[in-house]
Amino acid sequence: MDVNFWQGKRVLLTGHTGFKGSWLSLWLQSIGVELMGYALEPPTNPSLFEVADVAKGMTSVVGDVVDYEHLWKVIADFRPEIVLHLAAQSVVRTSYIDPVSNYNTNVMGTVHLLEAIRKVTGVRVVVNVTSDKCYENREWVWGYRENDPLGGYDPYSSSKACAELVTAAYRNSFFHPADYPKHGVAIATARAGNVIGGGDWTPDGLVSDIVQALLQQRPVLIRNPYATRPWQHVLDALNGYLTLAEHLYKHGVAFADAWNFGPYESDVKPVGWLVENLLSLWGEEVIWEQDTAYQPHEANSLSLDCAKARLKLGWKPRLSLSQGLEQITNWTKAYQSRSNMHQYTQATIHQLMSVD
């Protein structure tokens, strides 16, 4: 990512009050972006957005991507050059509880965003963040590539596959690469692995469940210790989104496609491995137990092939899974000791993104 590229750019970030959105907001603020966020109120209490005082360095608008008129007005008034779309219902288990809201946000929210962009002028780049779960999961031991079939067993996964299809349809119908000199809009999708990092209070997220158990000094309940996931630090995923946005801005439709951002194969680990190593880093006597309650279906094996991003974007993971777990431990202990988490999180961004 070229820091100088971002200085003075007008960027709209949807979902800025969420976990990834908060990290990304702080990063963009630190490099001189004129940043506006559009999202619901923080989805958890506590939240990284409030703990790290994210709002003080940006314009923060409370709104729902399901509300088309409001979203359109915000975009029309702000006229961003770059739109990073992170607003989503992001939890598999929540999608079982409220599938209608899940589809409204993840599918129609994408439609509303792209329709609003179609009706205004000035937007040059759109990065729509979907998910590694957008693929039809066949329990392969190798990573999914961008041209593998889309699908989804559960509402969340299928809604992200739908968001991919919506994006492709808008790109083909209204922002076709052949007509780029006329419309000037380059649209891509980003499919990241399971992101982890300090300040994650997402319900039913593995790391957030572990951290809450540690802070409350109770046993850690784990649903499936044998499931494997492409774990990566949140900043590696965000670096992928920003690198992709730069290429879209500079080179247009040559990069208007789908992109995977995930860890090296060596960091595709079972849940149990992550739990054991995070508890070891915490340094206190904590036990974990397998949750024997009924659990809705989730994929057992999942990984991503990120060769395309490495070869064509020059992107690669900077942090190993072990480094990511160390960051989570340090961040959580800083929060526990009532440090200034705005300053601490900003410093973490600069420190970790200087790693080669």
Image (cartoon, rainbow, N blue to C red):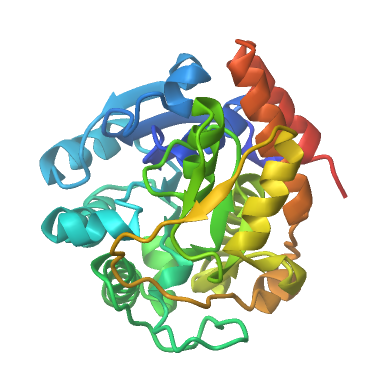
| Residue at the (48%, 69%) spot, across then down | 132
Residue 247 versus residue 2 in the image, above or below = below
Q: Residue furthest right?
A: 356
Q: Is residue 341 left or right of residue 317?
A: left
Q: Nearer the viewer, residue 241 or 279?
A: 279
Q: Is residue 26 left or right of residue 107?
A: right
Residue 182 coordinates in the image, percent (x, y): 38, 65
The answer, for residue 285, to whether it is visible in the render is yes
Q: Is residue 294 left or right of residue 224?
A: left
| Residue at the (27%, 72%) spot, across then down | 154
Residue 259 coordinates in the image, percent (x, y): 55, 70
Q: Nearer the viewer, residue 21 or 210?
A: 210
Count all numbered tags in the image, as a single digit: 0
Residue 339 coordinates in the image, percent (x, y): 64, 11
Residue 46 versus residue 243 in the image, above or below = above
Residue 91 coordinates in the image, percent (x, y): 34, 54
| Residue at the (70%, 32%) spot, across then down | 284
| Residue at the (44%, 36%) spot, across then down | 201
Residue 295 versus residue 58 in the image, above or below = below
Residue 158 versus residue 346 in the image, above or below = below
